[in-house]
Image (cartoon, grey):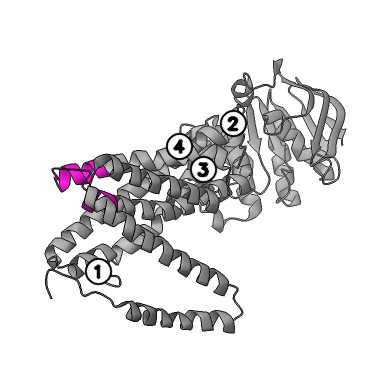
Amino acid sequence: MKGSTQDIELLNLIIGFSVMIIPIAIFLYYRVRLVKDLLISSLRMIVQLALVAVYLEWIFKLNNAWINSAWVIVMILISAGTSIKRIKVSAKTFFIPFSLAVLFSLVIIDGFFLGLIIRLDYVFDARYFIPISGMILGNSLNHNIVGLSTYFDGLKQKRELYYFVLTNSGSQKLAIRPFIQEALVKGINPLLAGMSVMGLISLPGMMTGQILGGASPATAIKYQIMIMIAIFVGCVLSLTLSLWYANVKIFDKYGNVKGV
Amino acid sequence: MIEFKNISLNFDNKPVFVDFSAKIEINQHTCFAGASGKGKSTILKLIQGYVLPQKGEIAVHGLGLNAENIAAVRSQLAYIPQNIHLPVDNGSDLVKMLGFESKHDLILDYCSQMGLEKEFYTRKFDQMSGGQKQRLIVAVCLSLERQIILMDEPTASLDAESTEELLKVIRNLKNKTIVSASHNPVWIESADKIINL
């Protein structure tokens, strides 16, 4: 049926949850302590998405640039907070730098794709601005966590390499380069791997959603290509900016690593 | 001259140095000797400003070791660590990583003095023994032509013959101050001055 999506009955949604028995059985069999986490995460997901449905309904109805931007900023702040929690670094030191890194990359990517490529008359249109920003943010979060963890762990565990290059080259730029290279490779590689098999072993969520929503596959694919490029550039940009901002905070006047 | 004046340093509330003073003369080989955990490697990090003492002063050729002078101090140093894991494949990439690609002839000359053929410069590290890799790193660092050469356990992965070759190169260096940390008796005895920690 074209133009509308088949709704899911509440009872069917509850029945759909019954397949969770499979992972729970596997965790119990192997005594993997993830059952409690799984239940909490599932509950959080339901509550958060239900709230989002209510917010989005309201936000979409108002479609106000300030409210839409405020919503995206809230998402940025939550993303920065989650990164800090997962990387286990000081919130006091890194919350503002990480938030700014994501904000700048989002401004550039949203401005370019929504304004120049899709050519929206109203760039802050909630139907485009919020979900596309959300997809970029969600992906940036994962890849930032991997990249930044790699960077901080590298500087902690391979200090001898940092000292070796810093003394012998006399350049901090050269001394941190191997660590930045490793962070970018580990942070971005999974995204490249995903892009290379897209359409073969994975049908992307945005494209599937658009087709389910009644869009033609050709339009859905064009949007998917665009969003993948936006996600890729957004991830590289936000990770690089986060690394640059982190560098301002993690070295003392002697060039020594501190606060990591 | 490198001078340590009344250095006190604690790690995790355990004293490593208490009111430690020493002088390292220029153009000599000074070796810090002592058992593991006595602070031999820490001395080399103190000179580079990677470990900062809680008390006392360090001066390198008259320059006090502080944030203002740190770049000037480090520019006089070459640092050869022990058994470092490098994220590059060979000597040529190592030179690129350190940002000086114009000294190939000098590197090859030091390689040859240490019994390494030219092809070792581009041979992959995983196709070399630990000793060959260490000697190549020493050759690269010596080609920096810095006045002060810091060597942390330089013979750790060398056999007796390679140790002798390295010592021969070190003895032939003119106008260089060598500061090493070692527990190898052959290496320690070759030094002009030994400071036991």
Spot occupied by residue B189 in the image (x, y as percentages of width and height): 85, 38
Q: Residue at x 50, y 38 (%)?
A: A246
Which label belongs to residue B94? 3
Measure the alpha-carbon separation of dots 3 and 4.
Answer: 24 Å
Q: Closer to us: mark 3 or mark 4?
A: 4
Q: Residues within 10 Å of mark 4 (few under 14, many from 20)?
A: some
Measure the alpha-carbon separation of dots 2 and 1.
Answer: 46 Å
Badge 4 element: helix
Tag 2–tag 3 contact (CB < 8 Å): no
Badge 2 element: loop
Badge 3 element: helix
Left or right of B99 in this view: A125: left
* Labels 2 and 4 share a subunit: yes
Q: Can you tell which quarter of the image residue B109 is in?
A: top right
| Callout 2: chain | A
Badge 1 element: loop
The magenta span reads A110-132
The residue that disc 2 covers is: A255
Foreground pick, A78 / A158: A78
The residue that disc 1 covers is: A199
Q: Earlier in the sequence, mark 4 or mark 1?
A: 1
